[in-house]
Amino acid sequence: MLGITDPPVATPTFIEWGWFSISIPNLIVIGVMVLLFALAFVLPFPGSHGKDSTGDES
Amino acid sequence: MSTEQSVEEFVPTTWTGKIRKSAQRALPYDKLMPETQPAYVASWIYVFGVLTIAALAMIIVSGTILSIEGPTWWHESSTGHFVNSLHFWSVQLFFLFMVIHLWGKFWMAAWRGNRARTWITGVIAFVISIAAGLSGYAVQTNFDSQWVAFEAKDGLNATGVGAYFSVTNLGQMLMVHIFLLPAVIAIIVVAHVLFVRLRGVVPPIDAALVEERNRVEEMQS
Ligand code: HEM
């Protein structure tokens, strides 16, 4: 028997900071999203057909 | 069949003809399915919309298998458990990709240039996806879902919307989860992508001027 009689998912550990509290899993997911967001801007994009970039001025 | 007749020459006499003419003018095939994109689209940030669609496709495929096989299968067989997990983790990726997509579009103000409908359909997709997620947690048919449904019921009743539906009604939640909300999300996503094609990808704020210059040069050559 998988699942059906298991007790609900265990309560995760929370980080508490005054009025602010967040579970570790949520914190990790938000961290991963911020990281991927940042990487999406800095990592080079492969295979652009060698055409000269138009917006590349910085 | 007069495929040579141009859209402008065609004078429709019926409503199907009228719809066809306006659709052909607004979204000719080369605009609907372009082979090239402006240079600024060569960045990973533009991939997250399609990643969201890919995750949604995985959700629909795994969800279809779950609904064919049924709850006993996904609770008791390891293959069922695997497909259940595939469904769950595709949802996690769907939201993760959607949020990065949303941040990207927010910080490049992608609603510029008469693209408000793209943004608004995105907002609707986001809100409905949250409802779809909640209804999914409520139809697992285990103690988790019972707990989720009864907690959610109290929260929703506090807002008054509990007058229109009950998250503790398994039959209702199942239909909402496996038909109603997926159908709405599918329609909204199709509209969202068609709106993107209609206006073309929005130029980055500092490239908007470059884009305009190129367009003028192209017209002159
Ligand atoms: C079901 C969820 C969603 C899917 C499947 C989806 C899909 C897409 C795709 C494939 C594109 C074109 C490619 C790209 O730029 O990434 C796009 C563009 C866009 N999306 Fe989404 N999206 C979703 C949710 C959202 C949300 C929540 C927002 C913001 C509230 C949003 C705002 C936009 C905007 C403004 C554009 C157009 C940018 C332009 O015209 O250049 N989308 N979306």
Image: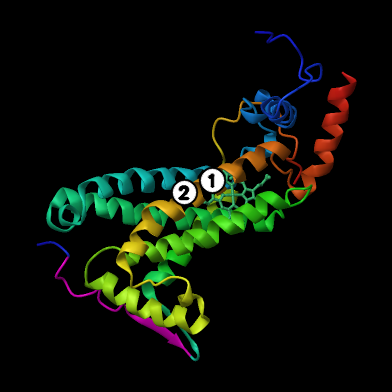
Q: Residue furthest front?
A: B14
User: Which of the numbered marks, if any, corresponds to residue A40?
Assistant: none
Instruction: Point out residue B128 in the picture as x, y percentages from the top left corner.
Output: 51, 60
Membership of B171 in magenta stretch: no
User: Which of the numbered marks, if any, corresponds to residue B187?
Assistant: 1
- Considering only vertical position in the picture, is B23 above or below A38? above
Q: Residue at x 83, y 30 (%)?
A: B215
Q: Residue furthest left?
A: A1
| Bounds of the magenta segment | A4-17
Task: Say which amino acid is labelled 2.
Answer: Ala
Image-based side of A21 in relation to B18, left or right = left
* Label 1, ligand 1: CB separation under 8 Å: no
Q: Residue at x 12, y 57 (%)?
A: B76
SS under mark 2: helix
Instruction: Point out residue B195 in the picture as x, y percentages from the top left corner.
Output: 66, 42
Instruction: Point out residue B129 in the picture as x, y percentages from the top left corner.
Output: 48, 58
The numbered mark 2 sits on a residue in which chain?
A: B
Q: Which residue is nearer to you in this view: A16 or B174?
A: B174
Q: Which residue is nearer to you in this view: B190 or B50?
A: B190
Q: Is residue B43 visible?
A: no
Q: Is residue B183 visible?
A: yes
Q: Residues within 10 Å of mark 1 (few under 14, many from 20)?
A: few
The numbered mark 1 sits on a residue in which chain?
A: B
Residue indicated by mark 2: B183
* Label 2, ligand 1: CB separation under 8 Å: no
